[in-house]
Amino acid sequence: MEQPKPVLILGGSGQAGGDAAALLRRWHPALPLTIAGRDMDRARRTADGLGAATAVAVDLRRGDLGLPADHRYSAVVAALWDDRLNGLRYAQHRGLPYLSISSGLVEIAPEVIASAQRASAAPVLVASHYCAGVIVLAALDAAREFDRIDTIRISAVLDEADTGGPAGRADLERWSTTTSAGLVRRDGVFGWVDGSEAQTDVTGVDGTVLPGGSIAILDVPSLALATGAPNVRFDFAVGESAGRRRGGPASFEVRIDLEGVGRAGAPFRTNRCLVHPAGQRPLTALGIALGVERLLGVRGEAVAPGLHTPEAVIDPAYAVERLMETGAAFVGATAVS
């Protein structure tokens, strides 16, 4: 019987990649992993801590990633900014599933076009959503209570002490300089808002109000098209989280507001506040791990070749179940008819 090939995790010694690898190891102890990074010593330490894992040095400037020609993998995960798309090309040329998390909404065109040009080569999972798609999945789980959804508003607070490692901070800086406009859907029409129209207050889980604004993020079209909601907006604020205000570490906070018509045919609205005491890192890692599971077919059938997003291939109820396992919780949730 042929031995399973390892999952190649580019940036696997970073925060998101390393935590995703740890989740995959916990869920699937026999799944081999290869931790790839520019710092071989750091990659080796991460691999040694996981067990059943190897380490390699990669060069994202090269089409072959600087890897030996005889190395074989089952999938490629870009847990960092793959600016030359060499990780994607490497996967496509070898017929391997590929997952990425760092191509912002206004940067995604080259990745989409490269995937479309070789659509039959392998599945490509674009998970450059907030927390690698976990918030979209949580919102879709809540949406099951509705017969029709008219409005979705996501309000996220990111603690300034919880911006991740160097790769995560670079992503935030790049996204913020690419565009100051936000993408919204209003009355069924996608459009851009900026200036005062984009600005809004974001209320944290403890009621603290922070200045924020609408952002350009894949969650908006994903939620709009998955639910048919004609009005969708994602607001974002950076500031002190409720966890730090209580004297603890930075916490994660996202409020999910849905309005529409319930199963009984009457007006219905809900709000859920998703929180995690350890910040955004466990949720981003979870999004990656959920995607890898589906791409490999270790949960459900393997994903077909083509371009995919998290909500198209991952069951929201299962994602929420895994969320709770990480220590996340929904607090202050209400439903109003």
Image (spheres, rainbow, N blue to C red):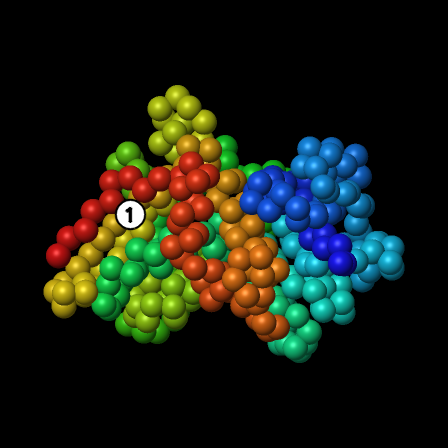
Residue located 43% across and 45% down the image = 323
In the picture as drawn, the residue positioned furthest to the front comes out as 1
Could you tell me residue 221's position as x and y percent?
42, 66
Count residues near mark 1 (Cα–Cα under 10 Å), then give few for <14, some for 14-19, many for 20+. many
Q: Quadrant of the C terminus?
A: bottom left
- Residue sitting farthest toward the right: 69
Instruction: Give the image location of residue 74, x and y in percent.
Output: 70, 59
Q: Determine which quarter of the picture holds residue 265.
A: bottom left
Residue 206, placed above or below residue 214: above
Query: The residue under label 1 is which amino acid type?
Result: Arg
Say whether residue 50 is visible: yes
> How many marks can you see?
1
User: Residue at 61% across / 60% down in the picture?
Assistant: 296
The residue depicted at 30 percent of the width and 70 percent of the height is 230
The answer to whether residue 20 of the structure is visible from this angle is no
User: Which quarter of the image is occupied by the N terminus?
Assistant: bottom right
Residue 315 lies, in percent from the top left, at 43, 59
301 to the left or right of 261: right
Q: Is residue 261 left or right of residue 108?
A: left
Q: In this orientation, which residue lies closer to the viewer: 51 or 71?
A: 51
Mark 1 sits on what residue?
Answer: 272
- Residue 235: image location, x then y, percent: 37, 52
Question: With respect to residue 46, does 63 lie above or below?
Answer: below
Quarter of the image for residue 140 reads: bottom left
